[in-house]
Image (cartoon, rainbow, N blue to C red):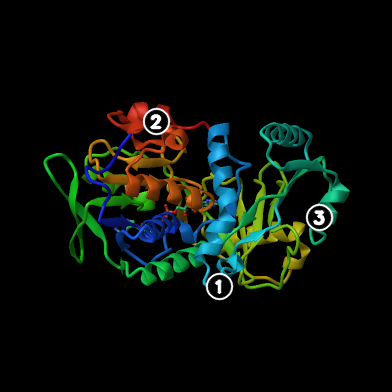
Amino acid sequence: MRIGHSHSGPRHVAVIGAGIVGASIAWRIAMRGVRVTLIEKAEAGSGASSHSFAWINAGAKQPIAYHNLNRRSLDMWQRFAAALSDDGDSASIGLRWGGKVSWATEAADADRLVSQVRQLQSWGYPTRLVSAAELSELEPSLDVGAVAAAEYSENEGQIEPQLVVDACLRRLAEREAAVHSGTEVIGFELRGDGRVAAVETTGGDIECDAVVLAAGADTTTLAALAGVNVPQAKSPGIVIRTTPMPPLLPNVPVVYAPPLSDALQEIHMRQCADGRMMIGEGDQESLAEDDSQAHADDLLARACRYLPGLAGAEAIPVPVGWRPMPLDGYPALGFAEESPNLYIALTHSGVTLAPALSQLAAQEICDGIAADAMLRHYRPQRFAGMTAEQAASMKRPR
Ligand SMILES: Cc1cc2nc3c(=O)[nH]c(=O)nc-3n(C[C@H](O)[C@H](O)[C@H](O)COP(=O)(O)OP(=O)(O)OC[C@H]3O[C@@H](n4cnc5c(N)ncnc54)[C@H](O)[C@@H]3O)c2cc1C
């Protein structure tokens, strides 16, 4: 089915938002020889992408269709990173493999962990149960304490979103794409058929024949200006940093450690390419707004309990990051029926999903053929015409 354009393909695409999703799509489209203008209201990479824990995974994704989409993207990261890196060295954009470990100390949590592993194994995902001894052997720098059940997911990894965005901008410069930072999109000039004729910005109007709307948490407000309904859930998250430390997790980059008491959530940690540790609590959708120094100190103290090498680090609080979060938790990707040349690109887990979603989006936009076999569950149209109450009832149970 042809979508988006009446002609063979767009000549000029405006991309709104230079986070990891918008920058990746802009790069993929520019690679196709299409003129691209990337518009960013602040600094490239400064939105949710700069707050992200940036763990690449498919293990935490349900149901199987969404798991498979994440898995496809995870499997694409190595090539995606190599193509973006200056010298083909994917480590230069912070890509590091080695997997993720998690473990439980309480019987109920252990049962849950075991059944998750069994389900992922039935989907063919490379995760397995390990003993306490194996866990300590996998990452000797951890002090794991009592272990009721433990798991190792060997194909997961981490990336540095800012380095990815910077690399996309370098590739865009090579293609002579225009990048307007500090330029806010404030409206759309719409034709009678709902198509966008021009994007209105604080720096003037930009005429184009297709638009990608990848403005993260601001996507809902901007889409409404073109008559498109893409509701989101508010999803604040906190991941603190520490001062730079020598390598502390040499074997397994991503660690999920169990709660220290009933009143506390599990914590997750990883080390950035520049030596700073990132520490968050709960899962990848946990809501958190306490960006105080006291809370950062508390997270660091809890992480130290599991990673003694962190002693001596100082906690650096980070302001709340707002996850782009379609109301049902799944990506909203595709042309809007109300505005047929406006392509919505709104997603949680955009770090994991950037390689696959950018490829699919660029293909749909440039070739005009719907990739429905991959994306039919994730079309923005599922929200069209919904009342707020109906949309709220779609909200994924947490
Ligand atoms: C705390 C936290 C932890 C996370 N952990 C993970 C994880 O471990 N793994 C994972 O895969 N994902 C994770 N995510 C999710 C992931 O970070 C996001 O899905 C991803 O960064 C979204 O990228 P984006 O480009 O869509 O949005 P953003 O990075 O928010 O980029 C959108 C850009 O649009 C710009 N913009 C907005 N409005 C306008 C306008 N009017 N005009 C011009 N520009 C505009 C913004 O300034 C921003 O730069 C996490 C997110 C958070 C907040």
Find numbered disc 1 in the image and state the secondary structure of the residue it sits on. Answer: loop
Tell whether 167 sits left or right of 341.
right
> In this figure, which residue is indicated by the disc labeled 1?
87
Tell whether 55 sits left or right of 357.
right
Q: Is residue 160 visible?
A: no
Which circle, 2 or 1, is nearer the viewer? 1
Disc 1 from disc 3: Cα separation? 31 Å
Image quadrant containing the C terminus: top right
Q: Is residue 93 or residue 105 the one in the foreground?
A: 93
Q: Can residue 331 be seen in this view?
A: yes
Disc number placed over residue 392 in the picture, else none:
2
Disc 3 marks a residue whose amino acid type is: Leu
Disc 2 from disc 1: Cα separation? 47 Å
In the rendered image, residue 4, in percent from the top left (x then y), is placed at 27, 42
Find numbered disc 3 in the image and state the secondary structure of the residue it sits on. Answer: helix
Kindly give the residue lying farthest to the left in the view shown.
Answer: 192
Disc 2 marks a residue whose amino acid type is: Ala
Disc number placed over residue 138 in the picture, else none:
3
